[in-house]
Structures are given as structure tokens and as C-alpha cells.
Amino acid sequence: MLTFGNNIQKGHFAHIAAINRVIIEDNVLIADKVYISDHNHEFGKNICMVGSKAISKGPVIIRKNCWIGEGVCILEGVEIGEGSVIGANSVVTKSIPAKSVAVGSPARVINHIG
């Protein structure tokens, strides 16, 4: 299920996929080529990728007033706190606190806003 708040701006080629839940709250700016998914595929020694089962570790929640930079990947089970900024080409594998600036692969908090 996809849930969108008000005043969301999404760039070109953004890819949002959900088998569980993706929530994007109000006033979120999503740049070009962003990937947001609440699921991955089952991997294992005897599992072929073709026809593999999609599994979710939990919803993705992007709180109000966030800015998601170009080329960012946001993976399952992640919450991005209100007012946070995710730098370009970051891979978000863990939740980010409110009013934080996070960058890198995997993304880590490098600064706090206000």
C-alpha cells in the first residue's frame, strides 16, 4: 500500500514499490532517480532469482518536510525522521533520526539541523 501526504514533489524516474506499506508524509521533496522499496527478494543457496519470493522487513516511512537527494535508495524497514535530508546517491539501510543530514553507502548521520 502506498500512502502519500500533501505537497509531495517527485522527480523523474523515481521508483516506489510496496508489498507491505510505503508512507510519504507532507512536504517531501524527492529528487530524480530515487528508489524506495519496502521489500527485497528471498536469497539462498538453493533459491533461483527467477520466481523468488518478495519479502518485507517492515514499512518505509518518510516523515514530513524531508528532502531526498538524487539517486538515493531507501530500503525496507526504514523510517526517515521529520525534517531530515538524505544526500545524493546514499543508500539508506537503517532509520535516520529527525532533523538529520545523512549521506553515504550505507547512509550515516553527519550533521543535525537546528
Image (cartoon, helix red, strand yellow):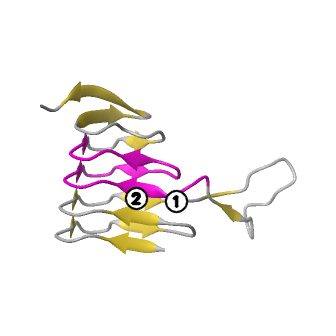
Is residue 36 shown left or right of residue 64?
A: right
Q: Give the amino acid at mark 2.
A: Tyr
| Horizontal side, residue 31 vs residue 92: left or right | left
The amino acid marked with disc number 1 is Asp
Magenta highlight on residue 72: yes
Q: Secondary structure at mark 2?
A: strand
Secondary structure at badge 1 equals loop
Please determine whether, in this image, residue 27 is positioned above or below residue 106: below
Q: Nearer the viewer, residue 81 or 74?
A: 81
* Most foreground residue, 38 or 65: 65
Q: Which residue is mark 1?
A: 38
Q: Where's residue 11, x and y in %?
A: 22, 66
How far apart are the alpha carbons under marks 1 and 2?
10 Å
Nearer to us of marks 1 and 2 is 1
| Residue pictured at 37% horizontal, 38% vertical | 96
Image coordinates for residue 62, horizontal then vertical, percent: 34, 55
Decide: is 66 above or below 8: above
Contact between marks 1 and 2 (CB within 8 A): the answer is no
- Range of residues picked out in magenta: 57-86
The image's mark for residue 35 is 2
**Front-most of residues 101 and 35:** 101
- Residue that appears at 24% across and 42% down: 84
Q: Residue at x 47, y 39 (%)?
A: 94
Labelled disc at residue 74: none
> Which residue is rendered at x = 25% and y = 34% of the image?
100
Specify the principal SS of the magenta part.
loop
